[in-house]
Image (tube, grey):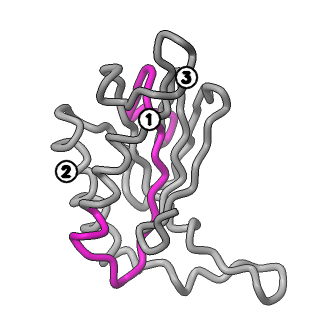
Amino acid sequence: MRVVVQRVKAADVAVDREITGKIGPGLLVLAGFEADDSAADLDWMAGKLVRLRLFSDETGVMNRSVQEIGGEILAVSQFTLYASVKKGNRPSWSRAARGDVSGPLFADFVDRLSAALGKPVPTGVFGADMQVSLVNDGPVTLVIDSRQPE
């Protein structure tokens, strides 16, 4: 499992010009899956995202988690995170899990993320053409891979 996480002041996702998920201060999480991702990957990532200290404390140091500040998380499925651009100029998506695999993985991940955060996590619409808007705070942007925890 791989995510791009961005600290945001606000973010939303729309499908056909209708907003399907919206948050205030918190994290925008773009999530991609491989076919062999497991419950352990989902649990690890959900826990990591909720506990990451990306928000400033009273001294201006990034020392607080999204949970500690009472923030929100918006999750959006993003199969293109597993693009390979080794050959030619057209990306290959062969490492990304097919929709029939990644759809349930994404739904399970959102459930685990909601449980870890202690509140619902809004999302886009799996497999839809989505438009994501955000006000990046910082900017703070991280790439996290459950198989290569750095």
Q: Which mark is residue 61?
A: 3
In this view, which residue lies farthest toward the right?
A: 88
* In the depicted structure, whether residue 37 falls above or below residue 113: below
Residue assigned mark 1: 53
Q: In the drawing, does residue 114 fall left or right of residue 136? A: left
For the residues labelled 1 and 2, the Cα–Cα distance comes to 21 Å
State the residue in front, 10 or 147.
Answer: 147
Which secondary structure, mark 1?
strand
- The quadrant in which residue 101 appears is bottom left
| Residue stretch in magenta | 16-42
* In the depicted structure, whether residue 14 falls above or below residue 60: below
Q: In the drawing, does residue 89 fall left or right of residue 137? A: right
Tell me which numbered mark, 3 or 2, is placed earlier along the sequence. 3
Tell me which amino acid carries mark 2. Answer: Asp
Tell me which numbered mark, 1 or 3, is placed earlier along the sequence. 1
Q: Which mark is residue 142?
A: none
Tell me which numbered mark, 1 or 2, is placed earlier along the sequence. 1
**Is there CB contact under 8 Å for labels 1 and 2?**
no
Few, some or many C-alpha atoms within 10 Å of disc 1 (few <14, some 14-19, many ≥20)?
Answer: some
Q: Which mark is residue 111?
A: 2
Camera-side mark, 3 or 2: 3
Residue at 35 percent across and 20 percent down: it is 69
